């Protein structure tokens, strides 16, 4: 079971660039890229910040597959 | 290959480390068989310490102003730093064993050779740590 996410999809819906989203949650663009590529698993705090910024429930954004 | 500011700053740090060691390594390489008298050795070590303080203050200030102030440090950076510094710490321990082993085997008799060995080990550990840090930034 691996932690996956729909970050790219929700980010595009909100018309955010990786840079914009990174700035608004206080991380670098590289971190957003790494999360989208499933390379880096964010902390609960960062995951919740991203979910809040994208106005989506955290369980919709991150899921096990 | 497009590099981020963080990756460029790590590469610059590697270059700084190599340049610094290249300034002093040749001197001790030439004098490996030399047994410095205490006052001469203290003079050379003091020279290295003073030079390193000035060198790294200037070098890292330049790096800070040009790159690091624009870099966002986040939890991913912390994780990468903790992994690379852990490797650096293990390598320092390992190099300590090499150093002690070399002294016990008495393959180095003169303090010129001992300082050359210390500087070489420090350079290797520092560069390997930074390369690993760079690798993690590229792959994580």
Image: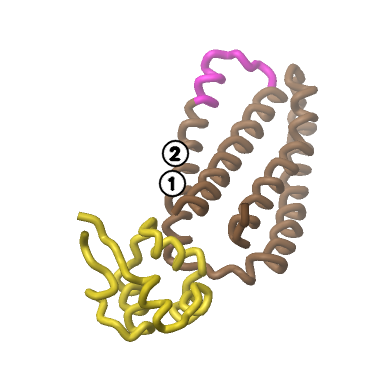
Q: Name the spot of residue B119 as percent of width and height, x first.
A: 66, 34
Q: Name the spot of residue B124 as percent of width and height, x first.
A: 60, 35
Q: What chain is colored brown?
A: B
Taking B88 as reference, is B45 left or right? Answer: right
The Cα atoms of the two marked residues, 2 and 1, are separated by 6 Å
The vertical placement of B35 against B96, above or below, is above
Is the same chain shared between marks 2 and 1?
yes
Residue assigned mark 2:
B90
Q: Which mark is residue B45?
A: none
The quadrant holding residue A42 is bottom left
Q: Residues within 10 Å of mark 1 (few under 14, many from 20)?
A: few
Outermost bottom residue: A55
The quadrant holding residue A49 is bottom left
User: Chain A's shade in the image?
Assistant: yellow
Q: Which stretch did the figure color magenta?
A: B98-110
- The mark tally for this picture is 2
User: What residue is at 67 percent from the left and 65 percent from the top?
Assistant: B67
Q: Which mark is residue B86?
A: 1
Q: Secondary structure at mark 2?
A: helix
Q: Considering depth in this image, is B42 or A1 the residue closer to the camera? A: A1
* Chain bearing mark 1: B
Q: Considering depth in this image, is B114 or B40 the residue closer to the camera? A: B114
The vertical placement of B117 against B82, above or below, is above
Q: Is residue B106 magenta?
A: yes
């Amino acid at each position: 079971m691996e932690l996956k996410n729909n970050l790219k999809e929700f980010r595009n819906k909100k018309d955010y660039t990786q840079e914009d989203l990174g700035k608004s949650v206080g991380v670098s663009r590289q971190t957003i890229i790494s999360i989208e590529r499933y390379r880096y698993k964010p902390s609960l705090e960062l995951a919740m910040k991203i979910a809040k910024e994208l106005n989506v429930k955290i369980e919709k954004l991150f899921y096990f597959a | 290959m497009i590099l981020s500011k963080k990756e460029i700053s790590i590469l610059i740090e590697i270059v700084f480390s190599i340049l610094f060691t290249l300034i002093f390594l040749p001197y001790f390489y030439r004098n490996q068989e030399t047994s410095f008298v205490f006052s001469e050795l203290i003079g050379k070590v003091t020279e290295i310490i003073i030079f390193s303080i000035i060198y790294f203050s200037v070098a890292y200030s330049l790096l800070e102003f040009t790159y690091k102030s624009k870099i966002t440090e986040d939890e991913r950076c912390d994780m990468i730093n903790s992994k690379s510094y852990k490797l650096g710490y293990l390598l320092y321990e390992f190099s300590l064993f090499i150093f002690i082993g070399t002294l016990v085997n008495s393959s180095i008799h003169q303090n010129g050779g001992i300082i050359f060995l210390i500087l070489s080990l420090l350079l290797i550990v520092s560069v390997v740590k930074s390369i690993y840090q760079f690798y993690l930034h590229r792959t994580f």
